[in-house]
Image (cartoon, helix red, strand yellow):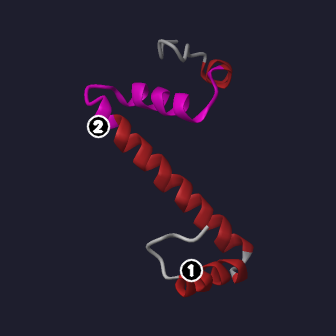
Amino acid sequence: MPNSDTDPAAERVLVETIREAPVWKRVALASALTEATRALMLADLRAQFPEASDEELRRRLAFQLLTPEEVKAAYGWDPETLEA
């Protein structure tokens, strides 16, 4: 789906460039996007919970990314209370 702020010709060039890139480059791009998304999510959580510790922020991030069952299984945290 084209972005409304991107010229369609420019978007075609971008997509074609990514398609032609070697696998390692595409993986690196995907990894960078994942890290950028994580950083934005943490920044939002810090703004919402300015007094939260780094540990609490990590728990809150895990709760946003995983199901409650996965949070309990992986971290032993109760997603409802964010406590171990």
The answer to whether 70 appears left or right of 50 in the picture is right
Q: Name the front one of labels 1 and 2.
A: 1
Q: Residues within 10 Å of mark 1 (few under 14, many from 20)?
A: few
Q: Is residue 67 left or right of residue 42?
A: right
**Residue 38 to residue 68: above or below:** below
Q: Is residue 21 left or right of residue 29?
A: right
Find out whether residue 3 is within the magenta segment: no
Residue 67 percent coordinates (x, y): 64, 27
Give me the C-alpha separation between circle 1 and circle 2. 33 Å
Which mark is first along the chain, 2 or 1?
Answer: 1
Residue 56 vs residue 5, the one in the foreground: 5
> For the point 62% across and 83% down, which residue is it?
12
Write the start and end of the magenta stretch as one range.
Answer: 46-68
Q: Nearer the viewer, residue 24 or 33?
A: 33
Q: Position of residue 15 (x, y in %)?
A: 64, 78
Tell me which amino acid carries mark 2: Ala
Q: Residue at x 47, y 77 (%)?
A: 6
Determine if the magenta segment contains residue 56.
yes
SS under mark 1: helix
**Seen from this angle, which residue lies furthest front?**
4
Q: What is the magenta segment's predominant secondary structure?
A: helix
Do labels 1 and 2 touch, CB within 8 Å?
no
Q: At x 62% / y 21%, what residue is drawn?
A: 68
- The amino acid type of the residue labelled 1 equals Glu
Q: Is residue 35 above or below residue 11?
A: above
Q: Secondary structure at mark 2?
A: helix
The residue carrying pointer 2 sits among few (fewer than 14), some (14 to 19) or many (20 or more) residues within 10 Å by Cα, namely few
What number is the disc on residue 47? 2
**Mark linked to residue 11:** 1
Above or below, 14 relative to 41: below
The quadrant where residue 22 appears: bottom right
